[in-house]
Image: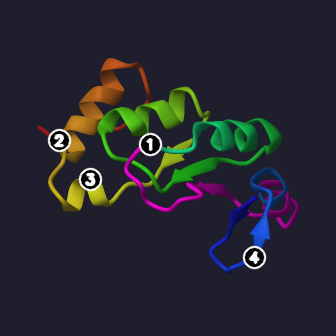
């Protein structure tokens, strides 16, 4: 069980299905421990991705460009949120985009 942004505890899959039922345009998954920078919770992200018919956004946990790519490839996320790795200069958006391109993940090409 994991906490939500509103302090309620819910099963992430049930929460995603509830968002879909309420006509949400996307469902989010957030690492239960917060922003650990140890990677997204791929098991939860994959479970939500399989259960819902709306886009899934992985959030909380990115510590490297590889974590973002893994959330898409292994977790089935349609999008990823990341801030800390950019704010603290651990990588650049260009590096992430180049990694995505090299792994065949659709992304707008890096600016020249």
User: Magenta region: which residues?
Assistant: 16-39
Residue ID for mark 4: 8
Of callouts 3 and 1, the N-terminal one: 1
Marks 4 and 1: CB-CB under 8 Å?
A: no
Task: Looking at this view, name the residue that lies furthest to the right.
Answer: 21
Label for residue 96?
none
Marks 4 and 2: CB-CB under 8 Å?
A: no
Marks 2 and 1: CB-CB under 8 Å?
A: no
Residue ID for mark 1: 39
| Residue appearing at x 40%, y 37% in the figure | 67
Q: Residues within 10 Å of mark 4 (few under 14, many from 20)?
A: few
| Residue appearing at x 35%, y 29% in the figure | 100
Front residue of 9/90: it is: 9
Q: Position of residue 9 (x, y in %)?
A: 76, 70
Give the CA separation, mark 3 to mark 1. 11 Å
Residue 16: quarter of image: bottom right
Q: Which element carries disc 3, helix, strand or loop?
A: helix
Is residue 88 magenta-colored?
A: no
Q: Which element carries disc 1, helix, strand or loop?
A: loop
Label for residue 85?
3
| Residue appearing at x 79%, y 43% in the figure | 53
The nearer-to-camera label among 3 and 4 is 4
Q: Position of residue 91 (x, y in %)?
A: 19, 45
23 left or right of 66 in image: right
């Amino acid at each position: 069980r994991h906490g939500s942004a509103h302090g309620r505890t819910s099963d992430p899959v049930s929460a995603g299905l509830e968002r879909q039922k309420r006509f949400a345009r996307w469902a989010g998954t957030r690492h239960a421990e917060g922003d650990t920078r140890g990677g997204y919770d791929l098991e939860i992200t994959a479970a939500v991705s399989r259960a819902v018919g709306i886009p899934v956004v992985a959030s909380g946990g990115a510590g490297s460009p590889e974590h973002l790519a893994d959330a898409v490839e292994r977790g089935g996320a349609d999008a990823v949120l990341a801030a800390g790795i950019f704010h603290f200069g651990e990588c650049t958006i260009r590096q992430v985009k180049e990694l995505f391109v090299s792994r065949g993940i659709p992304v707008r090409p890096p600016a020249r």
